[in-house]
Image (spheres, rainbow, N blue to C red):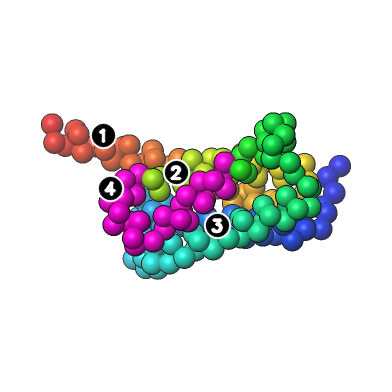
Amino acid sequence: MITIDHSPLSNTLGVLALTCYIITLLPTILRIVFPQIKETGIPKWLLKYRRIIGILAFFLAFFHGFLLVQKRNIDFFDPKTFWIYLQGISTFIIFTILAITSNDWSVKKFKKNWKQLHKLTYLAMFLLTWHVWDKMSGHWTYLTPIAIVSITGITTLFLIRLSIERQNKQQKKINTA
């Protein structure tokens, strides 16, 4: 039987980080999967604040991880422990890289490579999906279904986006041939 526990602050921060992260993924996904939403101005507004929301997601994830490391006295030099938290650590490393390079100077410095670097966010999305399912499925709180549905939903929408983009690319090839 599943019992619903009270959510500790670390989990609440994790879900808030997840929410902010999902918001950063929405503009492009919404524009491609639901093209009629462009007329509402929502994707444009989200794009305007994407960097700041992403940096907020990073700091929320940082405090989420900090509280968990502190609470569980995690030893990162123990290979077994490192393996247990691999998805969270990997996602956090990606978030750190993205946060450090989320500024105008980095965009100018890296030029085309900046966009390629920021595609790491999609790897983070899959790692985060694994992390949420792995860590939350055994410890149900009122936040668990919200987190699982949210990350699974955005991942599904991303896969739909990829499918639509592939179809559009194939259609262009057919039309130009």
Q: Which residue is mark 3?
A: 58
Q: Nearer the viewer, residue 153 or 63?
A: 63
Highlighted range, magenta: 90-116
Disc 2 marks a residue whose amino acid type is: Leu
Task: Choose mark 1 or mark 2, whichever is in front.
Answer: 2
Q: How far across and how far down the image is residue 45, in percent?
A: 40, 68
Q: Give me the C-alpha separation between circle 4 and circle 2.
A: 14 Å
Among numbered discs 1 and 2, the one appearing first in the sequence = 2
Quarter of the figure with residue 164: top left
Asked if one can make out residue 43 in the rendered structure from this viewpoint, the answer is: no
Disc 4 marks a residue whose amino acid type is: Lys
Q: Which residue is mark 2?
A: 120
Asked if one can make out residue 167 in the rendered structure from this viewpoint, the answer is: yes
Per the image, is 115 magenta?
yes
Residue, x 39% and y 45% (percent of image)?
117
Per the image, is 141 magenta?
no
Q: How far across and how far down the image is residue 147, in percent?
A: 64, 52
Q: Give me the C-alpha separation between circle 3 and circle 4.
A: 23 Å
The local crowd at label 4, few if under 14, some if 14 to 19, many if 20 or more residues have their Cα within 10 Å, is few
Relative horizontal placement of residue 171, taking residue 6 as reference (left or right): left
Among numbered discs 1 and 4, the one appearing first in the sequence = 4
Q: How far across and how far down the image is residue 3, in percent?
A: 85, 49
Q: Which residue is mark 4?
A: 112
Q: Which residue is mark 1?
A: 170
Element at badge 3?
helix
Element at badge 1?
helix
